Image (cartoon, rainbow, N blue to C red):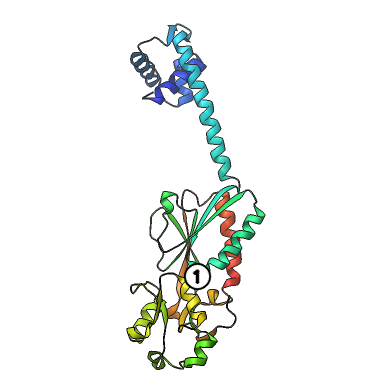
């Protein structure tokens, strides 16, 4: 039907028995009720009500239409209750997207959260592209760099990701280690293959060493870290990521210009749901320990 408002009006007229009663329930003027009934009857080519001094009685055609309207309204009410219920429980699907640097820690947080809420199905998305919260691609995002500015996003400071320069024992044994910035040009480095990487330490390093020193390049953090551990060269890692490799040597400690700000991002429509609020609280509690690394 083209105009559901007209059908709702007819349904309320049948329930209340009068135009004034339907108008009060619907919160509209009584003239609007009469106009809706007249328009609906004209469109259907049938009288839906018998008018009399005491009110409106539905005709046979009216009773048929109103039976369908009543069933449809009940279905809408049940659907609304289910949707509201999903927002008030920690069940269904939770989609979290994050930068790869903290994937190991975040995976542990997700596993513990799921243990507390076994009715939850988790999807953990990492990668280079930004997942669109306004398109429903994720419930919670951990973003690095400048704070997102989308108008419908709720953005909260999360933590500062500190990066240091690392080497494996094998690399140190074969090539020694730099003591100052001036020594860096004599060494080999493992870096992102993206020369336009937004990582602050990437810009810094490329300004300090010749391009020939960037000997091992990869597109994702995991192979970069694997190559550093294997001795391919010196490389930057966050202290959080490096904490999983106890034998790595911290060649140069973190500097402010190498750090990255992380943000927790949610969409305003989902931010206040119980599922998202519980997960954010759980994540913030865990992250307080990460900052000590």
Between 93 and 56, the one lying in front of the other is: 93
Residue lying at 48% horizontally and 17% vertically, measured from the top left? 66
Between 239 and 20, the one lying in front of the other is: 239
**Neighbour class for label 1 at 10 Å: few (<14), some, many (≥20)?**
some
Residue 138 located left or right of residue 247? left
Residue 94 position, x and y percent, is 54, 52
Whether residue 102 is visible: yes
Residue 113 position, x and y percent, is 62, 57
Does 248 appear above or below 131?
below
Return the residue at label 1.
101
Residue 113 located left or right of residue 134? right
Whether residue 162 is visible: no
Does 83 appear above or below 150?
above
Residue lying at 49% horizontally and 71% vertically, measured from the top left? 222
Does 156 appear above or below 256?
above
Between 221 and 283, the one lying in front of the other is: 221
Figure quadrant of the N terminus? top left
Residue lying at 35% horizontally and 86% vertically, measured from the top left? 209
Residue 112 position, x and y percent, is 64, 60
Q: Secondary structure at mark 1?
A: helix
Does 146 appear above or below 203?
above
- Residue 194 occupies which quadrant of the picture? bottom left
Residue 67 position, x and y percent, is 50, 17
- Residue 191 occupies which quadrant of the picture? bottom left
Figure quadrant of the C terminus? bottom right
């Amino acid at each position: 039907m083209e105009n559901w408002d007209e059908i709702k009006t007819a349904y309320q007229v049948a329930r209340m028995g009068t135009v004034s009663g339907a108008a009060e329930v619907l919160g509209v003027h009584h003239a609007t009720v009469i106009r809706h009934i007249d328009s609906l009857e004209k469109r259907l080519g049938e009288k839906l009500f018998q008018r009399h001094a005491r009110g409106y009685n539905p005709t046979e055609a009216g009773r048929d239409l109103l039976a369908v309207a009543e069933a449809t309204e009940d279905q809408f009410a049940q659907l609304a209750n289910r949707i509201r219920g999903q927002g008030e429980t920690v069940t269904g699907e939770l989609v979290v997207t994050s930068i790869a640097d903290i994937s190991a820690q975040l995976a542990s947080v997700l596993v513990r959260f799921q243990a507390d809420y076994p009715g939850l199905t988790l999807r953990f998305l990492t990668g280079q592209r930004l997942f669109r919260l306004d398109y429903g691609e994720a419930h919670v995002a951990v973003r690095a760099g400048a704070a997102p500015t989308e108008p419908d996003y709720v953005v909260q400071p999360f933590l500062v990701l500190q990066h240091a320069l690392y080497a494996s024992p094998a690399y140190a044994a074969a090539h020694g280690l730099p003591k100052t910035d001036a020594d860096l040009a004599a060494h080999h480095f493992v870096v992102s293959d993206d020369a336009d990487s937004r990582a602050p330490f990437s810009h810094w390093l490329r300004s300090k060493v010749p391009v020939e020193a960037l000997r091992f390049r990869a597109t994702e953090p995991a192979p970069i870290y694997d190559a550093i551990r294997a001795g391919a060269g010196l490389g930057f890692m966050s202290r959080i990521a490096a904490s999983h490799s106890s034998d790595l040597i911290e060649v140069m400690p973190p500097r402010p210009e190498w750090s990255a700000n992380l943000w927790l991002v949610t969409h305003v429509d989902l931010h206040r749901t119980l599922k998202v609020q519980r997960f954010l609280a759980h994540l913030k509690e865990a992250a307080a320990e990460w900052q000590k690394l």
